[in-house]
Image: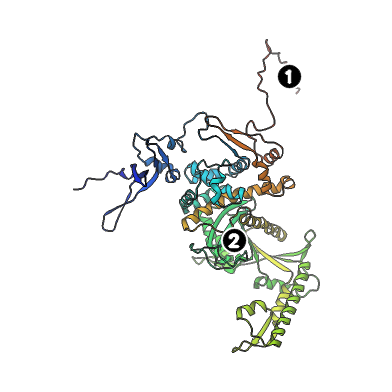
Amino acid sequence: MARPTREDSIYRISIHMNGGYMYASTHPYTLTADGKRKYSILHWGTVDKNLKFLPGPRYIYACLEERSKLIFPEDWDMSLADKLSGKRSQGRPSYDGDDLNRFYGDVWLLEQVAHKTGIRQDLLSVFEGNTEMVNDILTLAFFPYLTGYTYNRLARWQRIARTPSREELTPTMITRLTQSITESERLELFRLRAGRLEKGELCAVDSTSRSAYGDTLADIKWGRNKDGLPLEQTLEVVVYSLDSHMPIYYRTFPGNIPDSRSVETILTDLNHAGFPKVILVTDRGYESLANLERYILRKQPMIMCVKVRQSLVMEKILELGAFAGRPEGMRIDAETRIYHKQYDMAYEVTGKGGATIKADRLKLNLYFDAVRRGEELTTLDIAIASQRAALQAIKDAGEPLDDDVTIKKNYNWFNIEYKASDRTLIAFTINEKKVDTAKRASGFFANMTLGIDMGSMEALEAYGLRDEQEKYFQQMKGQMGFDKPRCWSEEGKTGRLLVLFTALIISSYVRHIWKTTNLKDKFSSTHEMLDEMRSIRCIEHKGKARFITPFVGSQLEICKAFGFDVPQGCAPVYHSKKKVEKKRGRPKKQHPIKLES
């Protein structure tokens, strides 16, 4: 009869020798189909000749509950493990590493922003107080923003810059870290960020494509590349708060999915994460009849840009009748020089149980720009003339036409007749109905609102705030260097997207403060502002407390604009420590104050 296995045996640490190294390992097992045990080896770190335990990535990134289950031999030196989060002893914060003199100012500023936005506290809650893992994530978030380089240079950068992470983040450690982040942790982070939002905040929804060289990820597909690159891509959707000026949600989609098909997934995610009823602002890519009815059924407030050639909009345009310079019945806004009119729309949807749900305050806002109409009509005339000349040249030369897709794209204003045998052009006529519709709709644009009380110009102004999200995508692909996914596994992609989300929360707040204060007049970009802070150093000598060099000049103005206190001893203001002697004797008697009735 086999000896019974102790329940805690899978948590007992033993030494595993491999390649001349001693690894601290456990031996968990799984049961096969026939009931046999299949053992595996998990390495938690290494052990030196003096039995001193050196924690590895698996131990560092494990939660406190998992660490506490491990049973180490009593004669091992666990001093390095005791320094990790949750086991540090109180006392004087002295430094016990090598003597270092590294740049710190720009990193210090981003650390303060991480505290101000609450992202550091939220990450600590998500990863159960694992300070080391949170510091590593923040280091990964800071590095591309501050340097513009890929993670291959991160370990080298850590030698000259003091980062939140105290470990050297090699490519292997970065891979293990990003692959350890799960969907549950992503959703928990959304729940915490949702708790920081107010009901009724304006939140823009938009997507961008990220081109990819590889094809190992399932979401990499051929689609409409928004960068105009001949590459496959993934689609990254972001919900961006226009009130708090930072992203609140992200998700990746296959590169071939249209924006309008992603709305149901986005609404479901926001509901599961406990987001309040924010006002979603979407462009024409998300407009469809199915999505409008989804918003009504979910009672989701929204501002949605709609195409003017849709039947609901064209009916209102035709009601205005023919006009020469401007349509009758529309009011003009003197500041923007735009004509506008708002229509109350009645719309009913049948729910799952057969109940009829009426749309809450559904309104159509119609706008007309006379200058825009002139430009669009001129562009239309030029396009028709150039297409007619090109088709006539092809007919005179007797050349064969391109494929049908190319013909439809290049000669979209004409009806074309050709021989099927050799594709030679027989005749072409202008598409009168299509041209008349284009002329009728020129100068008009429209949006719809649901569940909110906004006038037509208020809705237009709120929709215009989406430009801030466009700058967000530019920053992501430019300054942040995340224009292409640089991972080859699905687990790694999940982790890297969470790191990117963290980085863009911080960078969006930095950009907002730079843009809305006098910092924009002093620095041409946020990068120039961070460069100004970089010269501040953190000096660490063995056995001594760390020392930060003084803040001077523009560095003090930057701290003031962000509302951050300068570290103690770094400000130019000096408070004398001279002891003030009190005068001897009885204090002067205070006379009572008589109050008049």
Total marks shown come to 2
Q: Which residue has dot 2 on it?
A: 207
Foreground of the two, 498 or 318: 498
Q: Residues within 10 Å of mark 1 (few under 14, many from 20)?
A: few
Which amino acid, by three-letter code, is at mark 1?
A: Ile
Q: Which mark is residue 593?
A: 1
Pick the quarter of the image with the C terminus: top right
Q: Quadrant of residue 434?
A: bottom right
Where does the image place residue 13, in percent across and percent down from the top left? 34, 42
Q: Residue at x 79, y 58 (%)?
A: 335
Decide if residue 182 is on the left or right side of residue 342: left
Where does the image place residue 588, in percent across and percent down from the top left? 71, 13
Q: Residue at x 78, y 68 (%)?
A: 370
Which amino acid, by three-letter code, is at mark 2?
A: Ser
Position of residue 433 relative to residue 50, above or below, is below
Foreground of the two, 60 or 200: 60
Specify whether residue 198 is in view.
no
Q: Residue at x 79, y 62 (%)?
A: 337
Q: Quadrant of residue 105?
A: top right
Separation (CA) of disc 2 from disc 1? 70 Å
Considering only order in the chain, which callout, 1 or 2, is on the residue closer to the N terminus? 2
Q: Residues within 10 Å of mark 2 (few under 14, many from 20)?
A: many
Decide if residue 105 is on the left or right side of residue 72: right
- Element type at marker 1? loop
Where does the image place residue 309, in percent across and percent down from the top left? 67, 72
